[in-house]
Image (cartoon, rainbow, N blue to C red):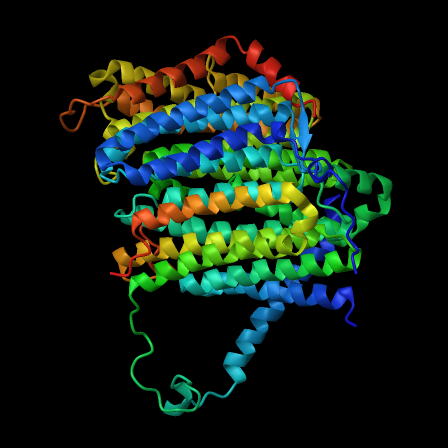
Amino acid sequence: MLGAYLPIIFLVVIAAVFGFASLCFSSLIGQKKPSEVKLAPYECGCEPVGSARERFSVKFYIIAMLFILFDIEAVFLYPWAIIYKKLGMFGVMEMAVFIVILFVGYIYVWKKGALEWE
Amino acid sequence: MLSLHSYLILSAILFSIGAIGVLIRRNAIVIFMCVELMLNSVNLTFIAFSKYLGNMDGQIFVFFVMTVAAAEAAVGLALMIAFYKNRESIDVEDLNLMKW
Amino acid sequence: MDMLQFPANIAAAAGVNFAAIMPEVILSVIAMALLLVNVFINSEQKAYLGYLSLIGIVVTFFSVVSGWGAPQSGFNNSVLQDNFSLFFKGTFLVSAFLTILITDQYLKREECNWGEIYPLILFATVGMMLMASGTDLMTIFLGLEVLSVSLYVLAGFNRANLKSNEAGLKYFLLGAFSTGFLLYGMALIYGSTGTTRVAAIASYISQNGMVLSNPMLVAGMLLMAVGFSFKIAAAPFHMWTPDVYEGAPTPMTAFMSVGPKAAGFAAFLRVFIVALPAMKADWSELLWVLAVLTMTVGNITALKQTNIKRMLAYSSIAHAGYVLVGFTAGNAVGTAGVLFYMLSYAFMNIGAFAIIVLVGRKGEENNNVSDYAGFGFKHPVLGMCMSIFLFSLAGIPPAAGFIGKFYLFSGAIQAGYVWLAIIGVLNSAASVYYYLRVMVFMYMKDPTEEFDWLAVSPSLALCLLLSVAGVLIPGIVPGTLLDLAQKAILM
């Protein structure tokens, strides 16, 4: 039964040899002429100004995190909004449960003070 | 009109790029971006199949994958911030306190 | 332009049946309530959250018990609460209960007494329960992710501790990576069978025999096997385990090594035995290799560990290997053995970790095997408990670990995998060395330093009591539990 997978093993071996050989050849044969301009970071053709590695306040990350979480939930609201009339009371209740669950998370975040900028 | 094959090949390529990126990149955020690329290539596969089969299940699956990816992103960012606070780095080479 | 037809009674058409997800609903409502309570109380009152979550688990457990023998399916057959899932749900609830009992003392010692840990444990348990009762790839995926996302946080919970940070981040990066593989496998199976329902996949395959040679289906199966193997920490996808288990807060290590592993097996069994029985010849060979690798790698690497958490991490890899033996057999004895073993493993492993919590000092210190020198004399009762857990892990009678291994290996022999059983027994014999090494330190070495008085909190004492009972009772009279396990596998 395992013999059926023999071609896959061959393929893996060939792929590995090919990849390794290409890397070796390019480092042996390829030309390398680094210059200052080539190595500089590309900034839309302008002269780079300052370091690109400035530190951002951690607050941005927390806001971004919360944004992703609450934003993505809208993905469930769109299909629901298109057909909610046909779903009737059942659809309203289902979405109410969903919103309540989100609201629990919102209260938690709020009380934890994650929404305050100061 | 593109055929199912084109979509599948594209998503397989994207998935491989993501998987290779995870293996060779060293910045935790870039690694996570590669994981996201993998997940989105799976989404593409699901949608292509869903369209081809005329079956909605694949599209519904994609909704859930997107939500889960967002939850993972939030948790991942939080873990990276916690790590950065203590180590001043998010390079995975610095994940080296425990070795076997 | 209205293509969608809506039946008059939408709820009935969507198969809404809350009886099928009652335990999950109860537990998630309690977890959300605790999350809210947590932000309104001060830090001295956090322990009440622990008590409340224990009450929540007991209530959920009653709901699980009352559902026994009455299978409920719902939501267009995307969940099925049968005896199989109920048995696993019981296992998850037991492991969550025991974990919460040992959490409080640890949190106070490490000064990270944040109440969020209790809702997170409950959410992780909800995820595990969804995995066990999921009969649709979608529900299994969602359950898995609810579990994983909670676990990433739990692994990195002690956020001031560098090792915990590292464990959380490592687990997160590798876990998300493996999720990608699992999902791609699910997508390919969906593409080749046109459905995500486990039962429908099985009937599609049995009606269209030629799809078995379809490379897309085989690739899907392999990718899913990779994803699940990661979650149950089977070699060669186990590399994250020792680091994560060593770095994570000790009670969370106990939890992670038991509950999620059982949940991974539940989903793995459900998908492979129910959906892909036609490919059994393929996947049982694959699992054979996985089982041998997992047992051997786990045991051999565990031999030279000095940190006891790391040693138990490798031991948990080896135990996943033993359970894979029963899975490979795939017959009634082997599968019942899987269920029996996961439950008894919950008791013995969390019990052992309770002792580790007790011996450990602030900052995750005092976790080396040599720190147990003289422990057995200074604390005879605790030493006795630890010995019982270690005996059970090593598979020495009369502990439950022995009975469990006996059923796993005899299942393999009945299915004709004699060599697999022999390798399993040899591995089990090798494992005795490193379990007994801890006991040698406990009883035959003099303590290197004066032992402090170990303050055993009442909840931790209760955990030890329950664990000892859970190891010894099924070990001496296995009949009842085995009977339950056998009833549970009639899926």
User: Where, by quadrant of the figure, is residue A39 drawn?
Assistant: bottom left
Q: Quadrant of the N terminus of chain B?
A: bottom right
Q: Residue at x 35, y 55 (%)?
A: B95
Residue C393: tell me if it is visible: no
User: Where, by quadrant of the figure, is residue C116 drawn?
Assistant: top left
The percent coordinates of residue C482 (x first, y second) are 59, 15
The percent coordinates of residue C348 (x first, y second) are 42, 23
Q: Which residue is drawn at 77% across and 49% down?
A: C194
Q: Residue at x 48, y 43 (%)?
A: A101
Against C37, residue A81 (above or below) is: below
Q: Is residue C176 left or right of residue A108?
A: right
Against B2, residue A104 (above or below) is: above
Relative depth, front residue between A14 and C279 = C279
The percent coordinates of residue C185 (x first, y second) are 65, 50
Relative depth, front residue between C290 and B72 = B72
Relative depth, front residue between C369 and C248 = C248
Q: Residue at x 54, y 51 (%)?
A: C178
Counting every numbered tag in the picture gives 0
Relative depth, front residue between B60 and A39 = B60
Q: Is residue A7 left or right of residue C255?
A: right
The percent coordinates of residue B97 (x first, y second) are 31, 51
Residue C204: tell me if it is visible: yes
Q: Is residue C290 left or right of residue C240?
A: right
Against C407, residue B66 (above or below) is: below
